[in-house]
Amino acid sequence: MNNKMRMYIGPYLNKDGTNREYEFYPEALGKGWEPILSQLYDDLVALGWDRHLYQYKEKFGGLRFYIGHGTTPIFERISCAEELSMRTCMECGKPGKRRGNGWILCLCDEHSNEELGIY
Ligand SMILES: [Zn+2]
């Protein structure tokens, strides 16, 4: 765990008015996306991001990363990570593609799963 990876939960504050802080888990969406999220975090902090994160999740086989305030370079950096995620296997980080019908995940050939209909 990288102790530097701390975030604030969206716009919410503690009762005493301080930011509600929590630890960020870049591996939470899949080991394969961990490097994308770790690098995104570092780059955004370097770009001056205030570390307020509203939500991050996987949707339709791609990363979604929602923040509050940000400059154009910050939002462009997020778009870049989201696009990269749609070409990266969530399981292992190798080149992948979005697969599935209804339930869509981004996986490589090795991790696609015919039984689950994700291939
Ligand atoms: Zn894979």
Image (cartoon, rainbow, N blue to C red):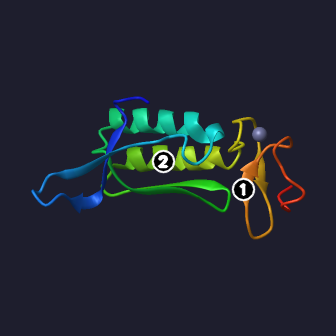
Residue 12 lies, with reference to residue 76, above or below; the image says below
Single out the mark in the foreground, 1 or 2: 1
Mark 1 near mark 2, Cβ–Cβ under 8 Å? no
Q: Is mark 2 within 8 Å of ligand 1?
A: no
Amino acid type indicated by mark 1: Leu
**Which residue shows up at 90% across the image and 56% down it?**
114
Nearest to N terminus: mark 1 or mark 2: 2
- Count of labels shown? 2
Q: Residues within 10 Å of mark 2 (few under 14, many from 20)?
A: many
Residue 59: % across, % down? 61, 61
> Label 1, on which residue?
105
Residue sitting at the far left: 16
Number of residues whose C-alpha sits closer than 10 Å to that of mark 1, classed few (under 14), some (14–19) or many (20 or more)? many
Residue 2 % position (x, y): 41, 29
Q: Which quadrant would the C terminus be assigned to in this image? A: bottom right
Residue 91 has which mark? none
Image x and y of residue 27, in percent? 55, 40
The secondary element bearing badge 1 is classed as strand
Ligand 1 picture quarter:
top right
Q: Is residue 56 above or below residue 91?
A: below
- Under circle 2, the secondary element is helix
Residue 41, image x, y percentages: 42, 38
Pointer 2: what residue?
Answer: 78
Q: Nearer the viewer, residue 35 or 18?
A: 18
Cα gap from disc 1 to disc 2, whole angstroms: 19 Å
Give the left or right position of residue 35, taking residue 117 as reference: left
The structure residue drawn at horizontal position 63% and vertical position 54%, both measured from the top left corner, is 62
